[in-house]
Image (spheres, helix red, strand yellow):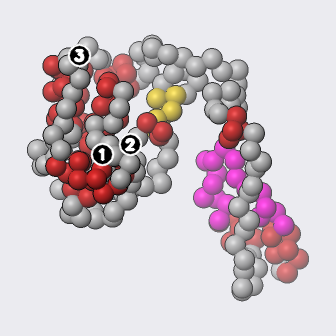
Amino acid sequence: MDVLIGAKLENLLLDKDGHIKIADFGLCKEEISFGDKTSTFCGTPEYLAPEVLEDNDYGRSVDWWGVGVVMYEMMCGRLPFYSRDHQKLFELIMASELRFPSKLSPEAKQLLAGLLFKDPTQRLGGGPDDALEVCQQPFFKPIDWEKLYRKEIEPPYKPSVQSETDTSYFDKEFTSAPVQLTPPPARSGPLATVDELDEMQSNFTQFSFHNTLDSSLREASEMME
């Protein structure tokens, strides 16, 4: 189990069939089991759990807080706690009472209240049962989790895309911007050997694109050998 500390709407994307894909694992602690703790202060301010703001060691229940914030946004159309002033925002997250729109169903309120419980030891999903406790909530009663996992449930919305590289759903402000590749780091020592370059490149074999500037380094290294 990983602590992601990155659950937010911007990181939830849809694939071409309408299934959710989680993106951006930049803020992530790996191999966190129940009872394990970490203490890194990181994350998007509006989604930080109270225990992170209080500078306490925290466990994987911070992820369920993030899920709660995202679900609150989806159901209520706004963040559960918000202020442009980050200090005020943090005070609201740590001490303010959670409020719900009157139109929200009792099952939805129960789920959100559990996920956004300020005490991580009492938070929904924060116990040893982890996700199982969340899946068993009345709000999710209609869902067949096995079928959902196997992608056998028809998504409510399917993007209309022409190919894997269709970017029509992205703002043209970004897709029309010039591509600027990160240059290779300046070297103060000898050039990397061909074997070293191959080892470095192996870290990116699963990426759909990687910088090919290393080819010049490869040629220079081969000349030096």
Find residue 37 and report its horizontal and vertical position in percent.
Answer: 23, 61
In the image, residue 61 above or below residue 101: below
Residue at position x 68%, y 41% from top?
174
Is residue 203 on the magenta stretch? yes
CA separation, marks 1 and 3? 26 Å
Inspect the image, locate mark 2, and give the three-letter code of the amino acid beneath it: Ala
Is residue 206 on the magenta stretch? yes
Mark 2, other Cα within 10 Å: few <14 / some 14–19 / many ≥20: many
Give 67 or 217, whichever is nearer the viewer. 67
Secondary structure state at the residue bearing disc 3: loop
2 or 3: tag closer to the N-terminus: 2
Mark 1, other Cα within 10 Å: few <14 / some 14–19 / many ≥20: many
Report the residue marked by disc 2.
7
2 or 1: tag closer to the N-terminus: 2
CA separation, marks 2 and 1? 7 Å
CA separation, marks 2 and 3? 25 Å
* Tags 2 and 1 touching, CB below 8 Å: yes
Report the residue marked by disc 1.
63
Inspect the image, locate mark 1, and give the three-letter code of the amino acid beneath it: Asp
Instruction: Judge whether residue 215 can be spotted in this image.
Output: yes
Instruction: Tell me: 193 left or right of 40.
Output: right
Q: Which residues are magenta?
A: 200-216
Report the residue marked by disc 3.
103
Residue at position x 28%, y 41% from top?
81
Find residue 148 and report its horizontal and vertical position in percent.
Answer: 37, 22
Residue at position x 66%, y 44% from top?
208
